[in-house]
Every structure is written in C-alpha cells, then in structure tokens.
Amino acid sequence: MSALLDIEGLEVTFGRTAAVRGASFRVERGETHCLVGESGCGKSVSALAVMSLLARGGQRSAKKMRFAGTDLTSLSDREMARIRGNRMAMIFQEPMTSLNPAFTIGSQMAEVMTRHKGGSRAAALDRAAELMARVGITAPGMRLGQFPHQLSGGLRQRVMIAMALMCDPELLIADEPTTALDVTVQAQILRLLAGLKRELGLSILLITHDLGIVARVADHVSVMYAGEVVERAPTAELFRAPQHPYTRGLLSCVPVPGRVQRDRPLGSIPGVVPAVGAGFAGCAFRSRCAHADETCTRAIPRRQAGDAHDYLCRLEPDWAEPQPA
Amino acid sequence: MLRLIARRLALGVLVALTVMTLAFLLTRLSGDLAVSIAGPSATQADVEIVRKAYGLDRPLYVQFFAWVGRAMVGDFGQSYFFKDSVANLIQKRLPITLTLGLVGLSLALVISLPLGILAALRENTWVDRGVTMFTMVGQAVPSFWLALILMIVLGLQLGVLPISGTGTWQHFVMPGIVLAFTAIPALTRLTRSGMIEAMASDYIRTARAKGLSRARIIFKHALRNAAIPVVSIAAVQLGFMLGGSIVIETVFALHGVGYLGWESIAKNDFPVVQAVVLVLAVFYIGLTLLADILNALLDPRLRTG
C-alpha cells in the first residue's frame, strides 16, 4: 500500500531565502512520523506547505506531493480548503492563542463539522462533546459554552486536538504540540496522541525538536537541517546507529541514563543553523561539522544505511568517530 | 454583565455631576451675569433689579443646587434671549443634531469599514497605499473648506442638493458627508490595523487550518476581533459629531444643538449654555456606555470585568 503522505523534493522560498530545499519524507498509514531538528531548520514550514498554509510571500513547489492518492500540487485553494480540517488536520505550538477569543469552544468546534460534513449545528455540538470527552476533558457539556480565556493551556490544546478530530481526518499534523505546556501536561498530551493513533488508526506527522518525544512516540524519524532532510530512519535504528554527523551531534546533546558519564560534559553543536539562499551547493552543515573537508562543498550523495534508513553525507555508513587523543 | 453595566452607569452619573458643576462654575467665572444680561446701557439700579429677578443675588451654592434640582426633573429654566423655555429650545433643536450625527456616522462606517478591510487584505499593495493616502488627505482637509467645495460643486454647479436649511432629507446629505469626513480617516485606519493584526493572528491560522471559507475567515473570525477598537472609537466620534458639529451646522444653516450652544455663548444666554453642555455630556456618557456594552458583547473577556 502506498504511503498516506508522500513528499518528494519539497521547496519553499520566502523571497531569496530558501526555507525548505528539496525535503522528502513519507508518512505511512497508521504511523507516527517525526520531523526533528533545531529551530529554523524548516520543519514547521514544511508542514505548513503541505497544508497550503504558508504565510504571505511563501512560494512552494515539489516534485511530488501526494496525500492518499491525491496530488496536492494540482489542487486549487478552494479544493485544498475542502481537505484541510476534513481529511488532514493540524494543531499548533501555541494553544493559548490558537483559538479565537471571541467565540465559544462549541461554536468553533461545530463549524468544522458543518463546513465539511454538513448536518445540523446540534449534531455537530453532540460530536464535539463526545470528542472532548474522548480527549480527556471533563464536563464537556459545560466547556462547549465557555470561551477560550476560561480554559488552561493544556485544556486548550486538548480542545484543539478534539477540534482536529471533528471530521475523522486520516492525517493529523502536530507542530510542536507540547512545547508550550508544563512537563506533566506534556506527557498527558503525548499519551493522548499515542492512544488516538492506536484507536482511530490516525496517522500523525509530529514536529518536534525534542528527541525525548521522538523516542517515545515516533515510528519513523526524518531529521531536518537547513531545509533538507539529512537522515531518515525507523526510530529504534536512528537511536541505535545514527549516521549523519548532525544526527549524532543532536543525540550527544541529550542525556541518556547509563550512557552519560558523570564528569564528561554533554555534547553541543557549535553555531546556529545558517540561513541558506537559493543556489547554495553542498552540505549546509559543513560550517559546524568536525568532519567536513573540501568535498563537502560539492553535491552530497544520499547513502543507504539500511532498508528504510538513508542519510545525506560524504561519510560511508557506520563511519567511526575519531577517538579523542 | 449586569455588574459591568451598573458600574459604568454609576461612573456616568459621577461624570454628569462633574460636568454640571464645571458648566455652572465656568459660566459664573465669565463675568457678572447681571451686568451682561442688563446690557451696556443699563444703570446700576437696572442691574440690581435684574440681579434680583434672576436670583443672582443668592449665594452661589444655593443657585447651583436650585439649578441642579430643577435640571434633574428636566426644567432648565427660561432662556434669557429666546422667549421660550430652555427645555423647549433643546427639544426643537435636538432632532436636527441627532439626524445629522447619525447620518454622519452611518456614512462614515459605510465608507471606512470596507476601505479598512480592503486595505488590510491588500496590505502593502497600491490599494493599501491609495487608502492610506485617502485617509491622510481626509484628515488634512478642514470641514468648512470641504463644506464650501461641496456646496459649490453639488449645490451650485450640478444643482443636485440644497445648500442650506433643514426642509427635506436631502438637506442632510451634504452636511452628513462633511461630518462623516471628520471620522472616516480614524475609523479606516483603525479597521485596517485591526484587520491586519487579526489576519496575522494564530486563531486565523487555525481557522484556515480548519478549511473554512475565505469569507467566513474574514467576516466572522477576523472582523469580530478587529471591530472591538472600532466600536469604541466610533462611539467617541459620534459624541464629537453631536457636540462638535457647530462649524458644519453654521455653514449649512442647520439650527441644531451645537449651533444653539454657539449662539447662546455669544449672547450670554447662560441657562441655555449650561443645558446644552449638560445634554451633550449626557449623550457622550450614554454613547460610551453603549460602546462598553457592545464591546462586552463582542469580546467575552470583558464580560467578567
């Protein structure tokens, strides 16, 4: 069976800045796929490009952009709006501001349903209450009549999730859904997403910078850097045998019980993600990479490190770190 | 919601009392009333008679409370100049001012809301710059000049509208346009900036992610939030229009309350001046209250306040 979401060679530019440069990733049905990377590496922009929600000035093109067999690049704005919120839903990083302060929770949830599936407002409100209970909101009947400012951040994110589920979407795109929340609430939301995936057969494209979250919920991971997907692998394999120097760098920044030694400092990657213009050639990570040489300014091959594992680097699979002298 | 209204009402009464006190004191400060009423040729004896007749010989606080007491029941006394009661005078003039104000505000909203929305949706294009230019010119043009230009073009050259008087609804069109122009620049710019802010907000991104139609996103989700500051300012603008339309009422010979107040100041007709100030203040207070209520209806976060 073909992938639910199949993106190949996605390019997004804002004026002369290239935010996404030929990113490719696939979300299989029923899996959680993580896009991971530092701030500014093009994760969110990729997701927004898939949803056709790019801010003004954003230009998108792709070799291939298929969702459940439909070519997304060929759709008009109107046709795309029919898919958004219906078959493909999205939740965001900012639960505090993502709901309209002027309307009740019930009205904001119901309009998704009446827009895409028709039917009465009353039926839509029933469905909203049912989903609010499903995502762990107590007293949904009362919440329907409340306004966003009367709810906490965690509750608002739950409302966003319930709202995203109104039309039974095949794909849920979650852009850093827990970043703005308390650690305890974060865990609850992640558990909720995992449960929804299992019970509803939902596919999730989860964007995060947090490798802890990746380890907990992802089936597959795409590591993004400066607008490119530099490594793709099943989660377990990525953690066991990371190939790209950037992936290894990211992993060295995270404390892992048993692996971190008491007196050795945690790793860090010097510098920040560079802004890359159109026409940039070679590896964008070379300025921060300890293994860079002159070949890194040329075209970089995509190397295979396993069945579903590939990466973008001049180094051979399972290259060894030079031992510190 | 009820508590909010009650609190604003109480505040309004306080403001009204303050305005009454100030209006009373300022008229007394402007000189000896008895002298000005009696006129330049009056003798000292005449002045004393006038002083007695109008009760101006009583202590100030007695005069003040007598006036306040009667004003409470709608009795503002007799005009010194017009042979009529002040209440009657105002009653006759008020419909003209109200009509003018409402025509002005309606025109202003009908023009500035669409312009502001359009400019916001076409931000940084020639449409937006054109609208901004228009508001700047609108702000710079003095009302009396615009009034005269309209009279010359529409009234005299084209002959489509009457240039003065209050006979028919057509008489209110030109003054309405001029009055509207005093509010259009501010309202347009507020609508524009409110819409730009709303359209860039996270909840509009959510609305788009929900696949809602463009019309629903703009007119339901964005406009509802952009309207909040516009409502406040529109109410204040209408207050200005009612009180500050003196120039326009004079140019177009519309004998409204503003014109009455201006006439009365010139003639030292103090009971009328005090009453006009009070009536306009009450309108202002009422409009502010109305704006607060409308805003509370638009923005649920204000309802608990």
Image (cartoon, coloured by chain):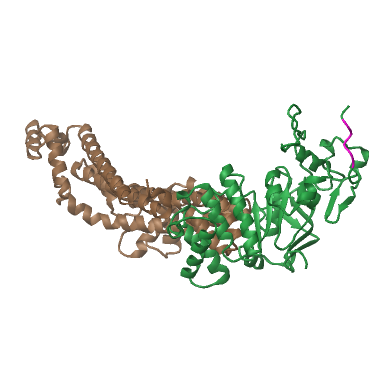
Chain colours: A green, B brown
| Residue A62 locus on image (x, y percent) | 78, 59
Which residue does the image show at 51% across and 58% down from the upper left?
A: B221
Instruction: Determine whether B50 is above or below A20 in the image.
Output: above
Most foreground residue, B41 or A163 = A163
Pick the quarter of the image with the C terminus of chain A: top right
| Residue A26 locus on image (x, y percent) | 76, 59
Identify the residue at the far right of this view: A295
Magenta segment boundaries in residue numbering: A319-323
| Residue A141 locus on image (x, y percent) | 44, 60
| Residue B175 locus on image (x, y percent) | 38, 56
Identify the residue at the far front of this view: A258
Q: How many marks?
A: 0
Q: Is residue B231 left or right of residue B14?
A: right
Which residue does the image show at 18% across and 51% down from the upper left?
A: B87
Pick the quarter of the image with the N terminus of chain A: bottom right
Q: Is residue A194 left or right of residue B159?
A: right
Identify the residue at the far bottom of this view: A119
Most foreground residue, B180 or B118 = B118
Most foreground residue, A237 or B134 = A237
Most foreground residue, B304 or A78 = B304
Q: Is residue A291 left or right of residue B199?
A: right
Principal secondary structure, stretch drawn in magenta: loop
Which residue does the image show at 59% across and 66% down from the upper left?
A: A167
Which residue does the image show at 14% across and 43% down from the upper left?
A: B69
Find out whether residue A322 is within the magenta segment.
Answer: yes
Q: Confirm whether residue B119 shows in the render.
A: no
Find out whether residue B101 is within the magenta segment.
Answer: no
Q: Is residue B84 left or right of residue A322?
A: left
Instruction: Determine whether A117 is above or below B301 in the image.
Output: below
Q: Confirm whether residue B199 shows in the render.
A: yes
Instruction: Determine whether A149 is above or below A200 in the image.
Output: above
